[in-house]
Amino acid sequence: MVTSRLITPPPQPLGTIAALRTLRRNPAEYWPSGLYHGETFASPLMGRTFFETARPDHAKTVLLDKRDHFERSSLVKLMLGDALGDGLIVADGASWKKQRAIAAPIFRQDHLDDFLPVIDRAAVACVGRLGNTSGPQPMLPAMLDTAMDIIVETMFGAARFDRRQTIADIDLLLKAMGAPAMPDLLNLPGWVPRLGLAKGKAAATRLRAVCQHVLDAKRADGDSDGGMTARLLEARDPETGEGLSDEAIVDNIMTFVGAGHETTSAGLCWALYLIAQQPDLQSELTAQARNALCDPVGPQTMAQLDLHWRVFQEAMRLYPPIAAVSRNVAGGIEIDGQDLKCGDHVTLVIMAMHRNPDLWPDPDTFDADRFLPEAVKQRDRYAYMPFGAGPTICIGWKLAMMEATLILARLLEAFEFTPAQSRTPYPVVRVTTRPDDGMILNVSRRTDI
């Protein structure tokens, strides 16, 4: 087994100025060590209380039992609103309920299985992208390109647009808007300038224009190609028969593009990093991939890749792509003796929860057996939340798991991965938990294929 340290968290909560600077730079360095052991922290700032917890019972309270007392984080809305509008990640109340009801059937397992050939083609293309040469390569660019291949085909089908510019805009958007602006942290009014966001907003405008272009093209052509955009056009509320407006469809295409592109890519990088340090595990994964992969790839293939599935789950425990989930208090409530009023801010720190020794024995040690069916049944459902939890759990989580599992299998069928450097990649939270160095690994083409 490999032991994987994340970061060294501060022993005590940071002072106000240091906390604000750290949140802007990398929230992973802000959360104090007590969170990793079930403690909670409440910090007053500009008339609001910022309450932080990493306890499963609190997560269940916020995301399920008392969810009507909470709404989407105002900070998240300010960070992502220009790009995602009122999509599922940002929407609240009746708007969220309507969109979720309309979109949910699209993500049924039998519908997702239709995308397996698309995912497999992208995975095979990723093998070609890494090539036949041996040596150190950054994994993140290849994973981002592969995730984009999947998104382009599943979302846009045969529609034409500037793919290279779109990829660049997604990256620019996440870098520019992946951390809260200082005026937002201080709860300052909207007219106070948010420096450094202009490029991100321009990228969001271009991306939304691409989505609208694809939508218009599909409607004009009567294109029912089975892709996500076409399905969103056809989807109807099961109770009212209403569809989504163009704006709502664009909002959700942007949501699926941003969330699906980034979270899967980051998770794959961390999974490959952990696998590269475990030769025996890697050999077992390679053998399973060769036994399972066939043409065409279908649901039966996925059923045989159970170890890959569990390995990716454990990688997301150690390095959760989404490090935290935040909510604003919409109605007064008490949590752990802390009275919270309307406008206060609650953060569920998934990164700390996933490394709590009371929830995960020997928490820094990689162990895919944690996700064997019996182990999962015995664990608190809210102790593991890589995709969130409760009614607002990521609607595309099954698709993300399918993508990651199949891509891992194709890569491990073709290549051997080994560490390329002695330093440990450092996690930086920018919407997702990215490796600071792009995840450089030695990649060697297997000769025994």
Image (cartoon, rainbow, N blue to C red):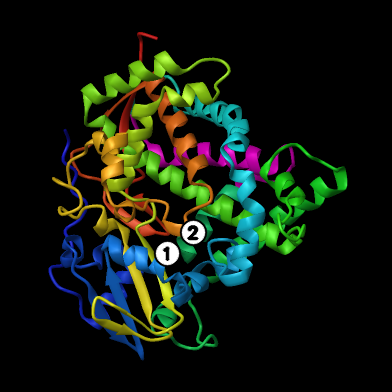
Q: Amino acid at mark 1?
A: Leu
Q: Which residues are magenta?
A: 136-165
Q: Which mark is residue 391?
A: 2
Q: Please identify the dominant SS of the magenta region.
A: helix
Q: Which mark is residue 64?
A: 1
Whether residue 86 is visible: no
Circles 2 and 1: CB distance less than 8 Å?
A: yes
| Residue ID at (18%, 48%) | 5
Seen in the image, is 113 located left or right of residue 15? right
Q: Amino acid at mark 2?
A: Pro
User: Which of the two residues, 241 or 27, is positioned nearer the viewer here?
Assistant: 241
- Vertical arrangement, residue 128 with respect to residue 271, above or below: above
x and y percentages locating residue 202 in the rendered image: 61, 65
Determine if the magenta segment contains residue 205.
no
Q: Residue 207 lies in what quarter of the image?
A: bottom right
x and y percentages locating residue 63 in the rendered image: 41, 65
Q: Label 1, secondary structure: give it.
A: helix
User: Which of the two residues, 343 or 379, is positioned nearer the viewer here?
Assistant: 379
- Vertical arrangement, residue 428 with respect to residue 289, above or below: below
Location of the C terminus by quadrant is top left
